[in-house]
Image: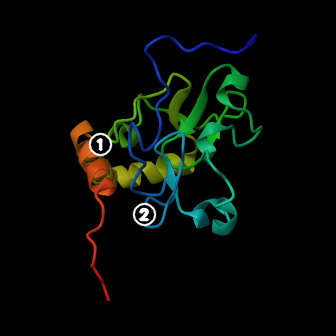
Amino acid sequence: KPGKRERRPGRRKLKAGRDYPNSTVCGNCWEGGDLLCCDFCPGAYHHECLGLDKAKMKEFAKWGCLHHRCIVCDRKAGAVGGALFRCVACPMAHCDDHLSEDARILSNNKIYEALGYPSASNTIHVLCSKECIKWYEEKKENKELDTVIEENKNEYQKFIQENKPEEKENRKKKKKQPRKAGFDPA
């Protein structure tokens, strides 16, 4: 199709759940629990932290977190010159036009890297405000950041183990086995 970009041979788009797990903690409050997982990155959030109605979210076949659009102008990376500034400490992303002067650019996102998620070419990791910088530094100082990174590394190792080709094949075989006749769980 004219105007449609072709993918380079041998490359495929990374997919949450197939190529990497989602984060084990909310990207807003950094607590675990019942999380809404992004279908396009490792982001995971509590419905309440994003102000979303849990029942309405079931209507969507796929959901993309706030890191995939500028929070101010709602444009995606392709519409703003190719990259968004995604905050490591909160669920906000900004385009170049709307990034605060107070923002601090980071070399990487250790939290997502621990999950096996490589930095995307359309992403620049930042701490987007004075509040996020302060909050992140506090998490770093009291070792909470190290704990989250370690939890994500463990989650990634578990994910890799469960998704080895032979493990997937074993699970498929177990599902296909017929139930034994005469079994009554009651």
Q: Which residue is mark 1?
A: 163
The location of residue 81, given as percent across then percent down, is: 68, 19
x 43%, y 49%: residue? 136
* The one of 161 and 24 positioned closer to us in this rendering: 161
Whole-percent x and y of residue 146?
A: 28, 50
Say what secondary structure mark 2 lies in: loop
The CA span between labels 1 and 2 is: 26 Å
Q: Is residue 86 above or below residue 44?
A: above
Drawn side of residue 18 relative to residue 50, left or right: left
Question: Do the CB atoms of the residues marked 1 and 2 lie less than 8 Å apart?
Answer: no
Q: Is residue 29 visible?
A: yes
Residue at x 32% of width, y 52% of height? 141
Q: Residues within 10 Å of mark 2 (few under 14, many from 20)?
A: some
Residue at horizontal 70 percent and vertical 15 percent from the top: 4
Viewer can see residue 157: no
The C terminus sits in image quarter: bottom left
Counting residues from the N terminus, which is met first, the one under dot 1 or under dot 2? 2
Return the residue at label 2. 31
Between 75 and 64, the residue placed more toward the observer is 64
Q: Quadrant of residue 71?
A: top right
| Residue 171 coordinates in the image, percent (x, y) | 28, 51
Which quarter of the picture shows residue 139?
A: bottom left
**Secondary structure beneath disc 1?**
loop
Q: Nearer the viewer, mark 1 or mark 2?
A: 1
Which residue is outermost to the front? 181
The amino acid type, in three-letter code, at marker 2 is Glu
Inspect the image, locate mark 1, and give the three-letter code of the amino acid beneath it. Asn
